[in-house]
Image: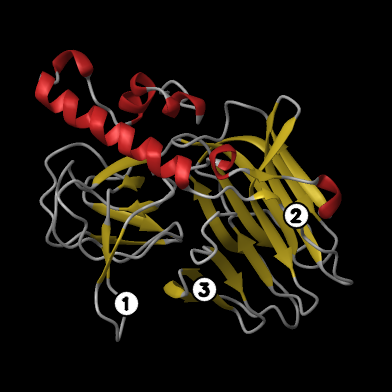
């Protein structure tokens, strides 16, 4: 088990290099200078990113909201929340200062599940409908790469039907995972791929919502992309290191490709961006389009793009 890396660790060059898996003792001085410049640029982008602040969620009759929040002394940081609408649909929301980003999952009455980011659908899947009798269990995602303190999302427990409180040292930029499942009353949820530390079941409506927080311990074969019960192999990328699984990329800028639009070069303002696949540091070229974490969609990262893995699947 690797040492836990906290958000505060990423504020120091030593902690940030550890997160990047950079061995300072065996890295040439000129390369370390490049890493230091990248660290300073990242800190500037983070400082410029607007903070979410207190989530002002208004109560809606017949609606339920459930939060997952990280304890930090007297502070309670909101890392995600689940909303069950009056219609009976479910939404998994991730707080972000960039309002255009709006990464979220949605599970609709007809069984359609969407993962969207920047208004673009990254994944669509057909599950059982939420009308009629719900049977067994359905996946609402495994969510990793947590940095709510940096996002500045303050959790107000009074705004939620229930709050899953997570102690420090469990969920972080690299470590920990939140697994969400919808289950038939009395039915077991899908298997958690690691050690469960916190588990809570909300039974206000059917299906029940099961929230589990823990450490994911499974390792994927090199070259495999994972997500939501399916896998595929990365094409066109020759991987020369042992990095694999789901990770965060820290770019100075991206080229975003959207259907029917001209490619747009944009700079990143938030470090919490995740993608599944394999790559080596500094690699360019195409990247698999199957995502397991909502993120900024992109086709070709620039030559300074780095993928840092938050957990191994």
Q: 136 or 160: which is nearer to us?
A: 160
Residues tagged 2 and 3 counted as in contact (Cβ below 8 A): no
Give the x, y percent position of residue 5.
46, 26
N-term mark: 3 or 1: 3
Q: Does residue 311 show up?
A: no
**SS of the residue at dot 2?**
strand
State how far apart marks 3 and 1 are (Cα).
17 Å
Tag 3 and tag 1, C-beta contact below 8 Å: no
Vertical relation: 83 (above or below) 175: below
Q: Earlier in the sequence, mark 2 or mark 3?
A: 2
Q: Is residue 137 left or right of residue 277?
A: right
**Quarter location, residue 229:** bottom left
Q: Secondary structure at mark 1?
A: loop
Query: What residue is pinned by disc 2?
Result: 66
**Which residue occupies 85% across, 64% down?**
59
Q: Earlier in the sequence, mark 2 or mark 1?
A: 2
Instruction: Write down the residue under mark 1.
Output: 258
Q: How far from the left and from the top, in percent, is residue 219?
A: 35, 39
| Direction from residue 170 to residue 182 in the image, left or right | right
Q: Nearer the viewer, residue 74 or 252?
A: 252
In front: mark 2 or mark 1? 1
Q: Residues within 10 Å of mark 1 (few under 14, many from 20)?
A: few
Residue at 45%, 69% (x, y): give it: 118
Q: Nearer the viewer, residue 212 or 90?
A: 90
Q: Which residue is mark 3?
A: 114
Q: Image height check: is 280 above or below 122?
A: above
In front: mark 3 or mark 1?
A: 1
């Amino acid at each position: 088990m690797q040492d836990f890396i906290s958000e505060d660790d990423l504020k120091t060059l030593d902690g940030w290099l550890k997160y990047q898996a950079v061995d300072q003792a065996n890295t040439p001085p000129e390369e370390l200078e490049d890493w230091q410049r990248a660290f300073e640029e990242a800190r500037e982008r983070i400082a410029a990113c607007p903070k979410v602040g207190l989530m002002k969620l208004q109560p809606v009759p017949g609606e339920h909201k459930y939060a997952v929040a990280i304890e930090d002394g007297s502070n309670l940081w909101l890392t995600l929340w689940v909303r069950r609408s009056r219609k009976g649909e479910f939404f998994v929301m991730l707080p972000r200062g960039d309002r255009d980003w709006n990464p979220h999952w949605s599970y609709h009455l007809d069984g359609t599940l969407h993962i969207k980011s920047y208004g673009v659908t990254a994944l669509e899947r057909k599950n059982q409908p939420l009308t009629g009798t719900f049977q067994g269990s359905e996946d609402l995602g495994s969510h990793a790469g947590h940095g709510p303190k940096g996002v500045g999302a303050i959790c107000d427990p009074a705004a939620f039907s229930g709050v899953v409180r997570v102690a420090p040292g469990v969920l972080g930029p690299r470590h920990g995972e939140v697994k969400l499942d919808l289950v038939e009353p009395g039915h077991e949820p899908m298997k958690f791929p690691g050690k469960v530390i916190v588990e809570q079941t909300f039974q206000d409506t059917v299906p029940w919502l099961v929230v589990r927080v823990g450490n994911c311990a499974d390792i994927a074969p090199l070259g495999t992309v994972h997500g939501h019960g399916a896998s595929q192999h990365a094409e066109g990328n020759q991987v020369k290191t042992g990095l694999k699984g789901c990770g965060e990329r820290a770019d100075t800028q991206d080229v975003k490709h959207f259907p029917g639009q001209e490619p747009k070069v944009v700079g990143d303002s938030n470090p919490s961006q995740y993608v599944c696949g394999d790559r080596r540091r500094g690699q360019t070229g195409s990247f698999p389009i199957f995502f397991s974490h909502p993120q900024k969609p992109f086709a070709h990262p620039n030559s300074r793009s780095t993928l840092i893995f938050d957990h191994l699947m």
